[in-house]
Image (cartoon, rainbow, N blue to C red):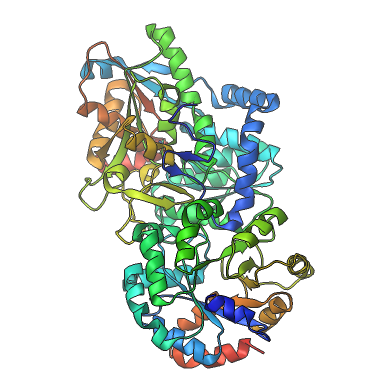
Amino acid sequence: MSKYQVNEKGYYGNFGGAYIPEMLYPNVEELRQQYLTIMQRPDFRAEFNQLLKDYVGRPSPLYLARRLSERYKANVFLKREDLNHTGAHKINNTIGQILLAERLGKKRIIAETGAGQHGVATATVCALKGLECVVYMGAVDIERQAPNVARMKMMGAEVVAANSGSKTLKDATNEALRDWINNPVDTHYIIGSVVGPHPYPDMVARFQSVISEETKRQLLEQTGRENPDFAIACVGGGSNAIGMFYHFLDEPTVRLVAVEAAGLGVESGESAATTALGREGVLHGSRSILMQTADGQVVEPYSISAGLDYPGIGPQHAWLYTSGRAQYSSITDDEAMKAGLLLTRLEGIIPAIESAHALAQLEKMTFRKDDNVVVCLSGRGDKDLDNYMKYFGF
Amino acid sequence: MNRINSLFAAKGNKRILSIYFTAGYPTLDSTLDIAEALEQSGADFLEIGFPYSDPVADGPVIQHSSEVALKNGMTLALLFDQLKVLRQRVTIPVLLMGYVNPVLQYGIERFCRDCRAAGVDGVIVPDLPMDEYETHYRDIFQENGLSNIFLVTPQTTEVRIRKIDQLSTGFIYLLSSSATTGKNLTVSESTDAYFARIQRMELTNPVVIGFGISDRQAFVRATDFADGAIVGSAFVRLLGEVDYLEKIPEFIRQLKP
Ligand SMILES: Cc1ncc(COP(=O)(O)O)c(C=O)c1O
């Protein structure tokens, strides 16, 4: 067993666990007892793989970005999660969880969403399976991600505004947990990232691990070497990053770089750079690193990118950070927006603002000329066009 | 034996009434005035909530009180400062209730020691898992004479209830249904059957029913099956009214037969 994976108690080093009220215990415990067994069943594996292939469009391409490579003087590959059905990596997880929910006999699905990508990915699989779907979304995010709200509604999901706190992802997650407490029998909660009580972080990581599994194979085909020198991904809760890192965790030559959102600047008071600003704490059912006051109240984060606007990170990230296995850096709004435009102009790809944070990290690094660098392009920028237009005054 | 044990052990103590309210709500320094008024009006024990920014087990009323309390500047350090004179003003059992993160940041040992110093008898931390408590916290709680209270819901298995009974030292907090706070209990055959099922288990600890107990009818129904019941949101709602202190005696009279 890798020291970077969850142990039998549900912990990654000091982090993880299941800090949940008794009302959530039966559902979380059922999941804990069943998830590995169900995921290993042949009927599950067959349907999961078939849907990833024929419905999501996997494998997603690994694209050697020539002009980007010239600029950064290394071989820069983009793992094209933006080309997945619904436009982001989020669907890898929702496909897995809907199949699990179905096998647990659940009739009703709830989810939280920030950028709306996870909400859309959840509404999509609910339409696919004919299950009732309720998505909680912060009132602020409903404003800034309007196209995704429309998509969810069109797919038959009910979108409920979370009006507490900062009215963003954290508050939407609170509302989803409250819904689950009040609907203890027939409901499954599809969490959108590697956060939440054990077994969620491990389960979501396993569903997203297809990203690095494919990357390994594709790199071998294209370069003759299956391990990259660098793997770079943005971190909100951390699911695309864990997916990108998963099969490289025990390959010490692969340098793992996780990119958080610095917002207006790490020290500006308007930031979501969790490892830089946070301390050990408990939120949404797990012990991790958390932005909080001295008194243990959760601090409202800020980022231009709704998908990174979260005050914590998944417990596995907290462990990768404290153990030094991965490097954590942060990128400001301005740096991300610039990197988003740069990719558009150099490669003809409009990235999600979340993914643009990972791309901006390239500016801060120096490479050897034959380094293979993989950036997880976690999503496409269609949902962010309004933001890009406003920011650049197009 | 702490005050909680004595309260339940005393013969003839039936239909015990506990009231929950949030420290620092409606004003920063209202905590002890409310506690004193509740004792004088006939409440049998108190749960004082310490506010948290992300109270996932709470409905809108207690969420709102927590938000206001935090805006007012309530912190655990300040609460313990206020509680220094608790035992000069209040004699009934007092428990603190809140979420685990503020306790972890305050420091679990310091928290337990300050509880003891203030004369706090027990603690309810819904998101502190039973296993964690058993392996890491039980000793420090017991050294400080604190009862840790566990919740039980209609979905809690019998095996787990037995385990909870074994680990409990004050009472068991039976939820009227799996719900966030503030949903009104609808008295029905199924809740009766659930309460009766727990009653038949003959647990070693007293059982107190909470969540959704908002009026005399619900209070009486709950205490037909259990040793006591807890009123939270309905009381916190009263604290949002003008002249709330004067209204407390009537509120308790309405509840308790
Ligand atoms: C495109 C995209 N990338 C990244 C994220 C951040 O989530 P995670 O850190 O779980 O990958 C989101 C979240 O909404 C997203 O939509």
Asked which quadrant contains residue B42, the reply is: bottom right
Location of residue B4 with respect to A133 vertically, above or below: below
Quarter of the figure with the N terminus of chain B: bottom right
Where residue A153 appears, x then y in whole percent?
55, 47
Q: Is residue B43 visible?
A: yes
Q: Residue at x 35, y 61 (%)?
A: B106
Location of residue A114 with respect to B68 vertically, above or below: above
Identify which residue, B80 or A377, lies in the foreground: B80
Q: Residue at x 35, y 17 (%)?
A: A228
Identify which residue, A322 or A366, lies in the foreground: A322
Q: Is residue A127 visible?
A: no
Where residue A46 appears, x then y in whole percent?
66, 23
Where residue B171 appears, x then y in whole percent?
61, 70
Quarter of the figure with the C terminus of chain B: bottom right
Q: Is residue A42 left or right of residue A21?
A: right
Query: Quadrant holding ligand 1?
Result: top left
Which residue is at the far top? A224
Location of residue A15 with respect to B183 vertically, above or below: above
Q: Report how many numbered discs are placed on residues in the image.
A: 0
Q: Residue at x 51, y 51 (%)?
A: B135
Identify which residue, B1 or A214, lies in the foreground: B1
Asked which quadrant contains residue A33, the reply is: top right
Q: Is residue B65 left or right of residue A321?
A: right
Where residue B205 appears, x then y in whole percent?
65, 69
